[in-house]
């Protein structure tokens, strides 16, 4: 060992105490940098997760509000349509009653009309 700096038993370089210390310090500094990077990444990850949760909640709430408005609007329109249907049905029934009344009146007039025509024919034919 004393002349060449090599360990004759292992066949490789000898790790001297000052080399160990330097290597250990380098490793510790690298570990500290890696740990700091990991902490920053975890903080960013937490912030992104929290933002995603907030965005999802806000989107869900906005969607539910929009659906509630659409439901209210649809219910209002249904009521309006039901009222319109009732009005139209009532008008149709009134029109059918009026048509039946006119038809009955017309049928009731056939007899008197035929009588009047026959009298006119008799009067016109006798002259």
Image (cartoon, rainbow, N blue to C red):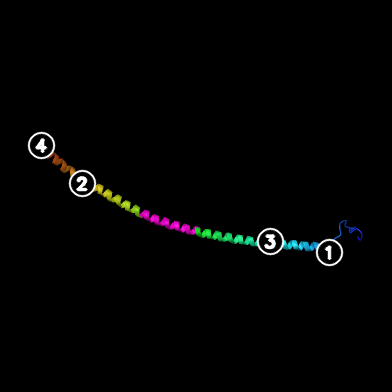
Which disc, if any, is residue 124?
4
Helix, strand or loop at label 3? It is: helix
Q: Earlier in the sequence, mark 3 or mark 1?
A: 1
Residue 62 coordinates in the image, percent (x, y): 50, 59
Which disc, if any, is residue 4?
none
Magenta-drawn stretch contains 62: no
Q: Is residue 41 above or below residue 96?
A: below
Residue behind mark 2? 105
Q: Are marks 3 and 2 in contact (CB under 8 Å)?
A: no
Count the labels in the image. Answer: 4
Residue 118 coordinates in the image, percent (x, y): 13, 39
Residue behind mark 3? 38
Magenta-drawn stretch contains 68: yes
Predominant SS of the magenta segment:
helix
Label 3: how many residues lie within 10 Å, few (<14), some (14-19) or many (20+)?
few
Q: Which residues are magenta?
A: 63-82
* Distance CA(mark 1)–CA(mark 2): 128 Å
Label 1: how many residues lie within 10 Å, few (<14), some (14-19) or many (20+)?
few
Residue 97 coordinates in the image, percent (x, y): 26, 49
Disc nearest the viewer among 1 and 2: 1
Helix, strand or loop at label 2? It is: helix
What residue sits 78% from the left and 63% below the top?
25
Q: Earlier in the sequence, mark 2 or mark 4?
A: 2
Residue behind mark 1? 18
Q: Is residue 118 left or right of residue 102?
A: left
Q: Quadrant of residue 26?
A: bottom right
Q: Earlier in the sequence, mark 3 or mark 2?
A: 3
* Distance CA(mark 3)–CA(mark 1): 30 Å
């Amino acid at each position: 060992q004393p002349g060449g700096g090599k360990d004759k038993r292992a066949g490789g370089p000898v790790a001297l105490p000052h080399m160990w210390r330097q290597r250990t310090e380098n490793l510790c500094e690298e570990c500290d940098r890696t740990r700091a990077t990991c902490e920053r990444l975890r903080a960013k990850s937490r912030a992104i997760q929290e933002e995603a949760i907030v965005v999802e909640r806000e989107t869900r709430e906005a969607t539910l509000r929009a659906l509630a408005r659409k439901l209210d609007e649809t219910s209002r329109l249904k009521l309006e349509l039901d009222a319109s249907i009732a009005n139209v049905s009532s008008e149709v029934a009134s029109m059918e009653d009026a048509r039946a009344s006119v038809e009955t009146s017309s049928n009731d007039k056939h007899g008197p009309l035929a009588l009047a025509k026959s009298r006119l024919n008799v009067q016109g034919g006798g002259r």
